[in-house]
Image: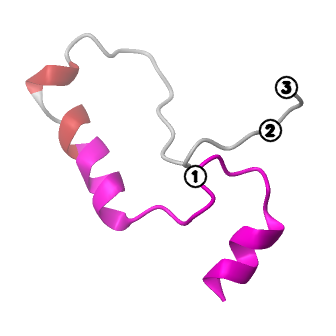
Amino acid sequence: MRATIIGQNRTSLLERFIDPAETAALVTYLASPLSSATNGAAIRVDGGVLTGLL
């Protein structure tokens, strides 16, 4: 089922579903002092979705 969904969705650069651990890693980074220079940004965990033409 996952392969069918991804196969029909050519807008994902990863061409796979994101693993929950990848989302957790971003949340951990954002909650850490390492992200102190990241401000006012919309951070998306979407696997690199293409929404327009290149």
Q: Secondary structure at mark 1?
A: loop
Residue 25: image location, x then y, percent: 24, 48
Q: Are marks 1 and 2 in contact (CB under 8 Å)?
A: no
Earlier-in-chain disc, 3 versus 1: 1
Q: What residue does disc 3 label?
A: 54
Residue indicated by mark 1? 14
Quadrant placement of the N terminus: bottom right
Q: CA distance from mark 3 to mark 2?
A: 9 Å
**Label 2: how many Cα within 10 Å (few below 14, some 14–19, many 20+):** few
- Amino acid of disc 1: Leu
Quarter of the image for the C terminus: give it.
top right
| Picture disc at residue 51 | 2
Indicate the secondary structure of the residue bearing disc 2.
Answer: loop
Query: Which of the marked residues, 1 or 2, is nearer the chain's N terminus?
Result: 1
In the rendered image, the residue lying farthest to the top is: 37
Where does residue 12 sit, x and y in percent of width and height? Answer: 68, 51
Tell me: 15 left or right of 51: left
Disc 3 and disc 2 in contact, CB within 8 angstroms: no
Name the kind of residue labelled 2 in the image: Thr
Left or right: residue 13 versus residue 36 is right
Task: Give the residue at the far left of this rendering.
Answer: 33
Q: Classify 36 as above or below 21.
A: above
Single out the mark in the foreground, 1 or 2: 1
Q: Which residues are magenta?
A: 1-27
